[in-house]
Image (cartoon, rainbow, N blue to C red):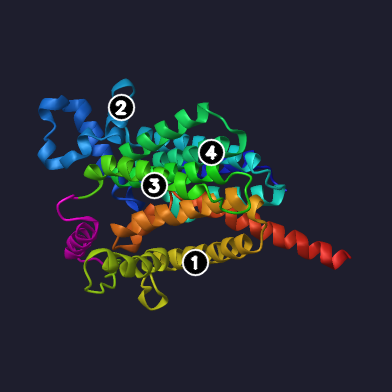
Amino acid sequence: MIKPITLIWLGFYSRIVVASFGGSSLVGDSYYYHWIASRAVNLGERGLDVSIVQAEATKLYATLLSILYSVSTDSYFIGCLFSIFVWVLSAYVLKKILELLKADNKTKYLVFLVYAFLPSSILNTSVPMREAFELLFVNLIIYSSLRVYLNKSLLHWLYLVISCFLLGQFHRGLYAFGAVILLMVMMSIFLRGRRRFPVKGFIVVPLIIFLSVYAYQLFSGQVYDLEKGLYLTILSYQEGTLYSSGRANYESFITGIEGTLGLLLFIPTNLFQYLFEPMPWRISSILDIVLTFENLFRGFLIFASLKGLLNTDVISRRPLLFIFIAYIVIEILWSFGTTNWGTASRHHVPGLALLLIPGFYFYSKRSLNRKKLVHT
């Protein structure tokens, strides 16, 4: 069986090939970030019209790319290499996560096989885009969280907070993901080693929730319009994206019920479309066929994760349950602002490892149990 490190390097070389031959034509949006960084380097602040490039010119990714171009050259291929090396770092962090979970060799092999060669991942981490960086910091957040929970590492609390902050710098909506993760880590520590929820938890948990809500409110000013509220902000944003008609657009089912109830009814349907569009009857290109197979594969891993979690001991499943819930949370957040399955394929990348780990962990465990039954 091929070692994980071999698959990582094969994934690295496959991305070099994509970057060398038509990366910009396959992922057209990547040229936008390259253009911002290149213009900033060549013209400086006076020549960079912020009103044209909106706020992206001052975001962390554009700044990092501009710095790289200023010390090297403003070559699109250099921007590609930047993303590819960051992807390698994210793969190394994933390797550490699997070692921390004591995953077997088959699980590691399957995880890295998909992590390295999933078509949408190859395309979106081979070009100057934010996805490789978001993927890295999501993996770092999970690794730091596991070190805090499993090893009681105080130092990794610092790494966790820094990673949550930096992830939000690449996409402000992911500040909310960081806030939820911090809440989950605090809850996990409180429940560590316990099979049941203790009575004193009814005193501690409200305090944790209060602190987490307060932290989220600090972030929410950057996440959505406080005057409109989350529900109306999501609706207005989605309606705005649908104005630009496109073959890959899908219109979410809107219940017409406003407020919290409307949001709760809207989330499941919107998430389902985000995860599984294009539906078979909407396929009209080879790319759609590839995305449909990826969606079916995603559905299989979600099913494997849920089935495995339901049939596993309470304490031993908690780290994997934590990872799977983190996956659902980040996908829900992405689904709020997505109405196009091409864009959705890009947004699936940052949370990829969060689905691969529990999905293949339980799939491999089930296969191993079957073999034991056959031999006995």
For label 2, the SS is: helix
For label 1, the SS is: helix
Spatial separation of the CA atoms under disc 3 and disc 4? 23 Å
**Which label number is shown at residue 143?**
4
Give the camera-side residue of 66 and 351: 351
Spatial separation of the CA atoms under disc 2 and disc 3? 44 Å
Residue marked by disc 3: 209
Please tell me how crowded label 1 is: few (under 14), some (14-19), or many (20+) other residues with Cα within 10 Å. few
Name which residue lies at 28% across and 63% down: 339
Residue marked by disc 1: 293
Spatial separation of the CA atoms under disc 2 and disc 1? 37 Å
Residue 75 visible in image: yes
Query: For this view, does 11 lie left or right of residue 316?
Result: left
- Which is in the foreground here, disc 2 or disc 1? 1
Badge 4 or badge 1: first in the primary sequence: 4
Residue 9 visible in image: no
Where's residue 29, x and y in %? 28, 49
- Which is in the foreground here, disc 3 or disc 1? 3
Please tell me how crowded label 2 is: few (under 14), some (14-19), or many (20+) other residues with Cα within 10 Å. many
Q: Which amino acid lies under the numbered mark 2 shown in the image of this protein?
A: Tyr
Q: Which amino acid lies under the numbered mark 4 shown in the image of this protein?
A: Tyr
